[in-house]
Each structure stands twice: as structure tokens, then as C-alpha cells.
Image: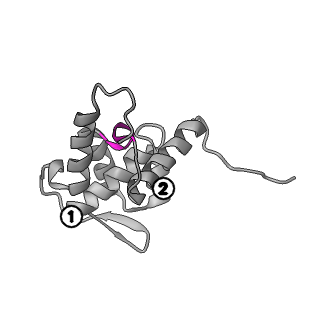
Amino acid sequence: MQIKAIRLNGIDEEKLFSDIFEFDNYISGNKYAPDVLFPSRQEVGEIYKAICKMPSVEERILQRFLKTCGFAKTQTALKTLVELGLIYKENGVYGALSSTKTDLLNSATYKQLSERVKCSEGIPEKRL
């Protein structure tokens, strides 16, 4: 017997690949859909709390939040938390650094996406 692919149960593969595409576009400086990348404060908080409870590798964090936040929002949340100095990434493992309250808009990534989402509201084609 051969295993052709291992997939997480209940994952919408089309959304997953779309999220990966949008995040790659964002990182590469290409046009992207900001609403796909922009996590809510609650989503960022849930990811932070999970990392505080147990440091984890990126793949584990992505698997845990794939159904609720999605790939792109989880990646954006991780990037935001690192920029704010609330978590660190060392040898592929994310861990908590500080529990100091801070405004997410102090992160360049979160602020940029917040502004892009506000600008794109009401625009039929939201790729900016």
C-alpha cells in the first residue's frame, strides 16, 4: 500500500492554496487581497495565548489554526507578534517573550494591512 498524500480532515484545499498564494504575493511585494491576510485582534490573541501555553514549531501552529483563522491570517499574526516583540522564532520554534499589552497597530505589518483593508472596502476587486 502506498500513501499518496496526507491531508488534514475537513480542510478546504482551495481556500488553503488561495491563502498561500495571497501570503506569498504579500511577502513578494506583488498585488494581494488585504482582507484575506488581515487577522482580527481576537485571532491574533488566540495565537499568542497558544504560544504562551506551549512553544511550537510553525507547522504545528498552522495546523492548529488552519480551520479557524486560515493560513494567511495565521502567518500574518505570527509576523505581527514577532514585530511587536511578544514572541520569538528560533530554530523554527515560536515561543513567548513578553506579556506586555501593546497595540497591534504598533506592528508595521498589521498597520499596513489595516490601512489597506480600510481602503479596499467598497471596491469590487480588492487586490491592491
Q: Nearer the viewer, residue 14 or 8?
A: 14
Colour scheme of the picture: one colour
Q: Is residue 48 above or below residue 35?
A: below
Q: What element carries label 2?
A: helix
Q: Which residue is drawn at 38% across and 45% down?
A: 73
Segment tinted magenta in the rendering = 33-39
**Residue farthest to the right, as pictured:** 1
Q: Are marks 1 and 2 in contact (CB under 8 Å)?
A: no
Q: Residue 37, how many percent across, how many down?
A: 36, 44
Q: What residue type is labelled 1?
A: Gly
* Residue picked out by circle 2: 60
Label 1 or label 2, whichever comes before in sequence order: 2
Residues packed near mark 1 inside 10 Å, few (<14), some (14 to 19) or many (20 plus) = some
> Between marks 1 and 2, how big is the CA–CA gap?
21 Å
Check residue 85 in the rendering and tell me which mark sits there, or answer none: 1
- Using residue 60 as the reference point, say whether residue 113 is left or right of it: left
Q: What residue type is labelled 2?
A: Arg
